[in-house]
Image: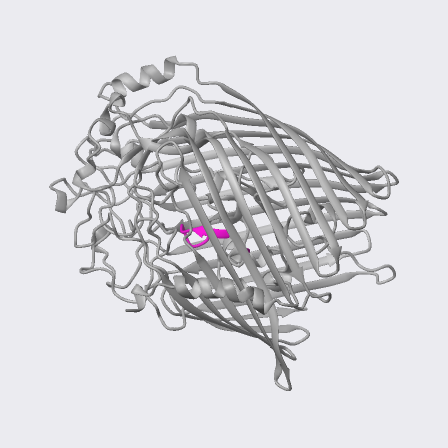
């Protein structure tokens, strides 16, 4: 019965109850700090501050999950440190994600290394979300909004203090998956010089679901099998390092940061492949200065990524003893390598990402501010798969050869306060996006469909140039101390990525390797894709008491997307799997990216209210409700991976050094699914989470239980389960049906964390 729970009535009751809770007004979620500042960076923004981040750090190794209590944000299930944020139904490349001012891009056909995966939760200072209507100064090449992640700002000694030395050591353990990790940071500074180091490590075995969800222990590589409740391919290990140096003189700051990340392995429960190595190196330089007329900031960065995929321990290639083919050591070529013998499917990706930003703000008057900026980004990508036999023979397959994606942008934005009750913002942004790719190659150019696709692709003009215009208008009206009303309109444009435009092979095996959606389907690109154009309107009404101890915030929104990049069944004229659409007799399908018309609408509600002040502490109630509806207007189909109606209700308690939360997280059944992609439905659920912490001046201890009652549930945005067995076929050896089985969520997990500062 517990997994058949349908929380819709309770969710609706919460939505109706929140206004009564906030009769005297405001919503402030326990793990989200919504700033009321009128600074430019906070216009239409939700800020997750340091206190909120610290409360969640021991419970997660995934920085994106720190956003899980931000209204309108949900998460695509992926690797243990690499979930993909979604803002009001639009995810991944449709969101501009900036990490310390750098525009990072996932360099992988499965998007296994998204931007936030390069930042450990212990090194996050603040996270800022601009949902839907983002000012043009932080938007660009996106239609969903913007996420800005910042590491802690450099620290300097106070005047007369001499030198400053400080640091932090932290560690945690989580029972489910035996996850453990630690972090260390240290800073030495004078009044004008600061040097700092941060390092973190995290690792976990596979996690267990709330109950058995398999009928037999499907085997992976070298006979490796898993218990019936173990969710295969969810293990990971990561290491992060960052060294920062900063100089300050008067109102001027120069800063340099060098970062290095290595992920030796991160396995994927909803992909046919696993990440078996990922190395990122980055250099980030910044200047910031204040002048009599305003401020000026310049930034330059360089990022290099080396990425490798193959089958992890829980998966295996289909050529082996149980398929009639000869066995071969995992990860090694057959001896001799041949078209009927394979030891894996190695896939390599390398990229370089270089960017330059110059921006400034000019104080026109005491009430008017002008922001101007120019940006350039140069991105290069190579994606190649060495031959290893088993139909991958004799050439190296080039998925993306010498891929290029260059962006040049400029913007102007005015913010004014014509009246104490009004704040207005208007801006325009222009971007030129140029993409191109070199000639490609199949494993065997002489075999259909490669024999026709390779020359057709290589002979065509592949260069594309997009001229994109964004515009944003926002206004805030504050008639008194108890209400704020925000209204806005935005036109946002995003150019397709290299994988959307240029992945080219219609043979099933290669198509199945291009999939960042976790649905198990195969995808092929479309060079004729044009940019997406989104028009969004939203209104936010924020009632609150004068001291903001009570609040209710309601935000309805509507987005219409012209040339939305969706996916349709690939045409039979492309040959290969597109001509059959029956991959192994299963229900996975083969798709091609295509421009369509789409619309999304929904509402976000959040609120808080104090309950009681007693001798044993302060008690409060906080909550949120979110609903999004997305539809393809050309086909009438539902958009893929839309979070169903969901809610959270939190009972908070604070007393002395104690800060405690009892949370109930709920979601309705997901049955409005994409028929075109054969999207898997999921049942509704309700989970209880318990968090407690106690802080001394230099020490903090966190204790908690996630999924307190060990409830079994499926992740609404987790995709199809592909975590075990011969994942390149429609059904692995054993009794796990690949199609139709959603990725289960984690069962009960008890965690503890400690942080010591000095």
Residue 259's x, y, as percent? 59, 46
Residue 495's x, y, as percent? 51, 29
Image quarter in which the C terminus is found = bottom right
Question: Which SS type dominates the magenta stretch?
Answer: loop
Most foreground residue, 398 or 140: 140
Q: Is residue 300 left or right of residue 709?
A: right
Residue 394's x, y, as percent? 26, 26
Image quarter in which the N terminus is found = bottom left
Q: Residue furthest bottom?
A: 615
The quadrant holding residue 170 is bottom right
Residue 636's x, y, as percent? 35, 36
The quadrant holding residue 515 is top left
Figure check: 722 above or below 527: below
How is the protein colored in the picture? one colour
Q: Which residue is drawn at 71% across and 61% down?
A: 482
Figure check: 319 above or below 500: below
Most foreground residue, 509 or 70: 70
Most foreground residue, 514 or 609: 609
- Magenta segment: does it hold 403? no
Q: Residue furthest left?
A: 324
Q: Which residue is drawn at 36% across and 33% down?
A: 567
Count of picture labels: 0
Q: Which residue is drawn at 37% across and 51% down?
A: 718
- Magenta segment: does it hold 80? yes
Figure check: 504 above or below 476: above
Q: Is residue 317 left or right of residue 565?
A: left
Magenta residues span 70-81
Asked whether residue 186 is in view, the answer is yes
């Amino acid at each position: 019965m517990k997994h058949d729970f349908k929380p819709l009535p309770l969710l609706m009751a919460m939505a109706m109850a929140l206004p009564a809770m906030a009769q005297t007004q405001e919503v402030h979620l326990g793990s989200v700090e919504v700033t009321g500042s009128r600074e430019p960076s906070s216009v239409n923004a939700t800020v997750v501050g340091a206190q909120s981040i610290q409360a969640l750090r021991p419970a997660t190794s995934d920085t994106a999950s720190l956003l899980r209590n931000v209204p309108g944000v949900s998460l695509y299930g992926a690797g243990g440190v690499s979930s993909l944020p979604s803002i009001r139904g639009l995810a991944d490349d449709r969101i501009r994600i900036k990490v310390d001012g750098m525009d990072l891009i996932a360099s992988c056909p499965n998007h296994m290394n998204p931007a936030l995966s390069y930042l450990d939760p212990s090194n996050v200072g603040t996270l800022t979300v601009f949902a839907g209507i983002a000012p043009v100064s932080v938007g660009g090449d996106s239609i969903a909004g913007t996420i800005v992640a910042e590491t802690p700002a450099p620290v300097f000694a106070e005047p007369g203090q001499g030198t400053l030395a400080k640091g932090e050591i932290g560690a945690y353990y989580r029972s489910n998956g035996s996850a453990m990790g630690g972090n260390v940071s240290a800073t030495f500074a004078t009044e004008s010089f600061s040097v700092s180091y941060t390092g973190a490590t995290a690792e976990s075995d596979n996690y267990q679901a709330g109950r058995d969800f398999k009928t037999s222990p499907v085997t992976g590589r070298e006979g490796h099998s898993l218990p019936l409740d173990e969710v295969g391919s969810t293990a990971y290990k990561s290491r992060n390092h960052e060294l920062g140096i900063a100089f300050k003189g008067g109102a001027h700051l120069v800063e340099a940061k060098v970062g290095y990340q290595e992920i030796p392995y991160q396995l994927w429960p909803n992909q046919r492949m696993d990440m078996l190595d990922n190395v990122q190196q980055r250099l980030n330089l910044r200047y910031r200065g204040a002048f009599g007329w305003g401020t000026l900031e310049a930034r330059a960065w360089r990022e290099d990524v080396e990425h490798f995929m193959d089958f992890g321990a829980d998966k295996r290639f289909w050529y082996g003893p149980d398929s009639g083919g000869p066995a071969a050591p995992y990860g090694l070529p057959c001896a001799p390598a041949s078209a009927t013998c394979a030891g894996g499917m190695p896939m390599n990706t390398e990229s370089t990402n270089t960017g330059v930003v110059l921006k400034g703000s000019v104080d026109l008057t005491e009430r008017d501010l002008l922001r101007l900026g120019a940006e350039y980004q140069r991105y290069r990508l190579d994606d190649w798969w060495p031959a290893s036999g088993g139909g991958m023979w004799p050439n190296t397959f080039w998925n993306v050869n010498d891929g290029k994606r260059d962006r040049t942008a400029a913007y102007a934005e005015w913010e004014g306060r014509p009246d104490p009750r009004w704040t207005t913002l208007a801006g325009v942004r222009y971007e030129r996006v140029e993409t191109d790719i070199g000639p490609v190659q199949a494993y065997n150019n002489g075999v259909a469909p490669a024999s026709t696709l390779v020359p057709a692709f290589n002979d065509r003009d592949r260069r594309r140039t997009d001229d994109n215009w964004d515009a944003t208008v926002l206004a805030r009206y504050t008639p008194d101390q108890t209400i704020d009303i925000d209204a806005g309109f935005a036109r946002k444009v995003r150019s397709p990525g290299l994988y959307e435009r240029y992945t080219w092979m219609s043979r099933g095996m290669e198509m199945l390797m291009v999939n960042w959606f976790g649905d198990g389907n195969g995808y092929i690109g479309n060079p004729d894709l044009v940019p997406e154009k989104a028009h969004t309107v939203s209104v936010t009404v924020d009632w609150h008491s004068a001291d903001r101890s009570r609040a209710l915030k309601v935000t309805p929104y509507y987005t219409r997307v012209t040339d939305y990049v969706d996916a349709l069944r690939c045409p039979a004229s492309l040959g290969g799997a597109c001509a059959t659409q029956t991959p192994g007799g299963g229900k996975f399908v083969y798709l091609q990216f295509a421009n369509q018309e789409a619309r999304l609408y929904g509402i976000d509600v959040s609120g808080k209210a104090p309950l009681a002040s007693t001798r044993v502490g302060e008690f409060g109630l906080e909550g949120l409700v979110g609903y999004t509806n997305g539809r393809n207007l050309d086909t009438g189909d539902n958009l893929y991976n839309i979070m169903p109606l969901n809610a959270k209700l939190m009972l908070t308690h604070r007393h002395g050094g104690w800060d405690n939360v009892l949370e109930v997280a709920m979601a309705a059944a997901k049955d409005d699914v994409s028929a075109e992609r054969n999207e898997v439905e999921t049942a509704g659920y309700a989970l209880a989470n318990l968090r407690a912490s106690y802080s001394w001046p230099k020490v903090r201890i966190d204790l908690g239980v996630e999924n307190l009652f060990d409830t079994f549930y499926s992740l609404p945005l987790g995709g199809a389960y592909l975590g075990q067995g011969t994942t390149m076929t429609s059904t692995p050896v054993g009794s796990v049906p690949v199609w139709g089985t959603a990725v289960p969520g984690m069962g009960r997990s008890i965690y503890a964390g400690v942080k010591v500062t000095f």
